[in-house]
Every structure is written in structure tokens, then in C-alpha cells.
Amino acid sequence: MSDNCSEQPMVARIEDAPSGPEWDPEHEEVGMDRHGLVPVMNVTWRIKADASIRTLRGSELNIVEESTNQRVCMQFSYRIKNLLTPNYSRWTFSLNEVVVEPGYTYMVSVFNLPQPEIGEYMIRKRITIPGCGNKRIQKVQLCQENGSLWDSNIPVAVLVNRKPKMLSIFVGFNATQYSERYQVSIQSGGFFRSKNVSKENRTSLNVTFEFGLWQLSQCEMSVTIQAFFIRCKNECWSRKKTIYYCPYYPLQTLILGAALGLLVIGSCLSFLLWRTFHKDPPNTSSPADKDQPEIFQLQQRKRVLIIYSLDHPLYKNIILKLCAFLATKCGTEVVLDLLDSTRLGVLGSIQWLEWHKEQIENSSDKILILCSRGVQAKWRAMCGDKQVFMRQDACSLVGDMLTPSLSLLVPHFIRSTSFKKYIVAYFDDVCSEDDIPSPFNVTVRYKLMKQFEEVFFRILDTEKHEPGRMKQIEGLSEDKYHQCPSGRALCDAIQAFHAYQQEHPRWFEDELMESSELEVEENSDEIYRSANLTTYYVHDS
């Protein structure tokens, strides 16, 4: 048995090729490993008992994860002389305990070797692994780290405080193994309160809310407990419970609340009558005054991680000038591998990326993905196309940083319910929308520097357009950003690379190192092993 499927499979004439295999329906496809910690896939097939069995030299098995195109391939070599086994049953082969992930779908295909030169004897089937909601799967380690077994058991006590017109809500719940932090919130109509609590080696936690009865407008209140598990972090499921607190406080409180409500309604009616007889003078301001954008003042320093490809020295200069513009003009903290070479050299590329990715996931910071021809070419190489290696990557001390970045970010991006952490952009003077990898086509793609102001509002996590007004940051529009020194340097760098592309239409092909394909393939395999996206355990039948 071999896990090297890089060579082309054997091909034979039709009369010399064996017939195709068949699936074995008697074996379970999805199960658990021997320790019950991870879900596994078992693939079993049978050989047809006909005369072509004498030409059989082996079988090839392919398993592809459909959302990321991640692939595992195995070749089995054997020669069979008899139609049946010594037990007079058909020959059966299997690949057992292939580690898979809950909720994912895999395409499995098997064909016998050698293949015929005309036609196809391949069999295929799609296998979907149950998600963490499945009773059997929810016990695996990955699901438990997402909170699959958490029983919050929320007891809620409503207490009437001795102080007049005060109410206390006591919320208790069970903590869980894989979450150290919890957020407890209560809501009733427009009233909302929340508190954070840490586990600190305790098995049960409690929170108490105190507030005035006059702050409530209805008898129904929802209690929500949000746990932050180590896997799903800020996107975990929450537990909710609804309570009715009106029976807990005296009748006179209800009467007082009703009286206050009538008083508020009467005041509103009086104000409306007064406005009817005292109308404001007509507004003489022009429509142009209303359309004037509001200058937005920066209040908080944000951080952004920039992902890019070293396509060319002039493009590298654009990236560095953009970082300088973000830092000096925009007051943004920029995380870039070229500017953090010391820590990168100590940690290594994968650990460096994972550390920054975790920091961003636990904050409101953003990841800016700058697409270019190199980004598209390296993404296609990850999907099975020809491997590419850029000259600038060979000159860099850390090598190709884009491929491990995509390996870490794309699976999380695909599974995300919201893409607000990611900003996808490209310099339209030197790149095009065709340079954007297919997974990022589901989100907004920004043109730089034409839409830089919109990008910066995304970094600030602020909406540019709001009902009745439009915000603007002075000096960031397409026709003004180059008026500052750092913006002028960025504009000059873009124009220099644009002029170079006009003079050298095959500039990208000139930057490819064809002689380094084997070395690139070995480095890429090492990167994937270090990234540990999916581990496959293979046992011979």
C-alpha cells in the first residue's frame, strides 16, 4: 500500500484492464476511533469475480473534502489468481479509520489498476459526517471543545428587595470544562443588562442583577448565558430561558407603574398639542447643506494583519508604503511579516500566523487580504494546479508566507457565519478582480485606492452611511490621499509598478522560478503538515 499518488496511474487496453470495483454495503461508513475521541471514515470495496481479475494489479482510493478540496490518495498493490478467497467469498479491501471532521462532506472514489485507455470504471459516493448535534458525534473531543455536552441547567430566582420598588434577579448555572469565560445578560423590552464572569476552577457560577421596577415595561424577561469555548470562541451557541417576574412583586407596585404610565402618556399628548399651535418656522436650508458629509473623528487605534504575496520588488514597495500610510496618516497598528522579522524568526511562520490570528479573533481587529496575480496562482496551486514559486519568496528570509496564511484562514473563512473580520481588496491599477481566489468572491471586494475610505471604515468597525447622514474621514478619498507625504509615496509606488507592467507585459512569468518546482513541493508539504489541518490515520486491511 502506498500514499504516493503523484504518478499517473497505469493505463491498459480495454481487453487487458480489470472491471470496476463495487461498494461493500455490509460495512459501516462512519464511526469512532478505538478511543472514542474522533470521528473516522471506513471505506470498503469488493472485487468482481470475473475473468478480468487476472489482470488486476491494485486499486486507487481518493477522498476529497468538498469545501476546501483537501485530498488524501492511497494506492493498493496486489495480484489475485483465484476468483474467490479460500473461504469462497469475494475479495474485499478497505481503508479504515480515516480521521474526518464533524459536519463535513467528503467525495470518495475508487478504481482498479490498470485503468482502461478508453472509458472509466470508477465508483464514487458522497459521505456526509454528522455534525456535533448528533448524539454519537457530540462526544468527540472537537465537539466538546465547541460546547456540545454543556448542560447549563439555569435556575433563576426572582427576589423582591426590601428597598422600595427594587427587584433582584439571581441567575445560577453550571460551568463547563472547555470555557473559562461567560457572559450573562437579561432583557425585557428595551431594558438590557449584562455581566461577565470567569470560572476560576468552580463548577457552578451565579450572577445577581438589581434594578428599579420602573425600568421595566413588561412582565416577560429573557435570560441568556453565552459561553466562550476554546474552539468557537465568540461564535458559540448561547443558552436562553424566559421568566415572568410580575407575580413576584406586590399589587401596589403594579398600580404605581400603571399610574406612571398614564402620566407619561398625558405628558406626550400635551406636548403634541403644544407643537400643533407652535409650529417651527420653515426650514430655509438648502438640500445641499443636508447632503454635506460629516467629518468623522478617530477615537480608537485599531490593528490590522495584512496578508499578501511577494509578486515583485515594486509590488513589495507598494505594500510597505501602504503600511506607512496606515500607520502615519490613519493611526493604525499594522501587523506585517516584513516588519516583524525578529519574532517571526523565533516562532516560525505557522506559530507566528496562529498567534496573530488568535489575537484578532478575540478582538475587533481585522485581517486585510490584498489580492494579486501571485495570490491567485498560489491558491490554484493549493487546489491541485501547477506549483509556483516567486523569486521574491526565494530572496525572503521567511520564504512563502501566503500559502500557510491561506491554509489557516480559508477554512475558518468558509465556516464563518460573518465575514466582518476579513477585508478583501486589490490595487486596481496593478491588479484586477480576476486575481481574487474563489472563496473570497462571497464577500465585498474593494478597489484601492479608489475605495480606501470604505476599507478604513471597515477597519474601524464603523458604518460610513447611517440614516440621515454620511461620515467622511478627511484626506482619505481617492483625490486627496496623496496630499500627505506618506500618501504621495504610496501613489508614486503604485504608478511606478503600473508603468513597469506596461513596459513588461510578461513580468509575472519572469518572476516565476521554474527550476525550483521540486523544492517548492517539498516545502509546501511541510507547511501543510505543520498547519495540521486534517490528520489521516491509515491502517492496511
Image: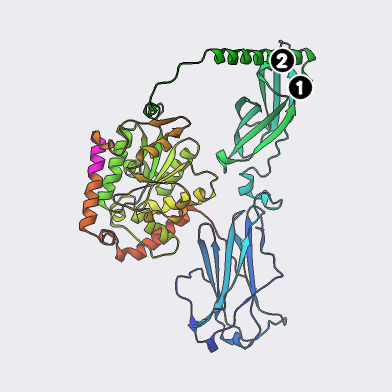
Q: Which residue is mark 2?
A: 257
Question: Which residue reaches farthest left?
Answer: 503
- Seen in the picture, residue 211 relative to 172 is either above or below; the reply is above
**Quadrant in which the N terminus appears:** bottom right
Magenta stretch in the rendered image:
484-492
Quarter-of-image position of residue 155:
top right
Q: Closer to the N terminus: mark 1 or mark 2? A: 1
Residue 167: image location, x then y, percent: 71, 17
Magenta: main secondary structure equals: helix
In screen coordinates, is 247 left or right of 132? right
Which residue is at 72% across, 82% downward? Answer: 88
**Residue toward you, 461 or 384:** 461
The kind of residue tagged 1 is Cys
Q: CA distance from mark 1 to mark 2?
A: 12 Å
Q: Which residue is mark 1?
A: 246
**Residue toward you, 378 or 27:** 378
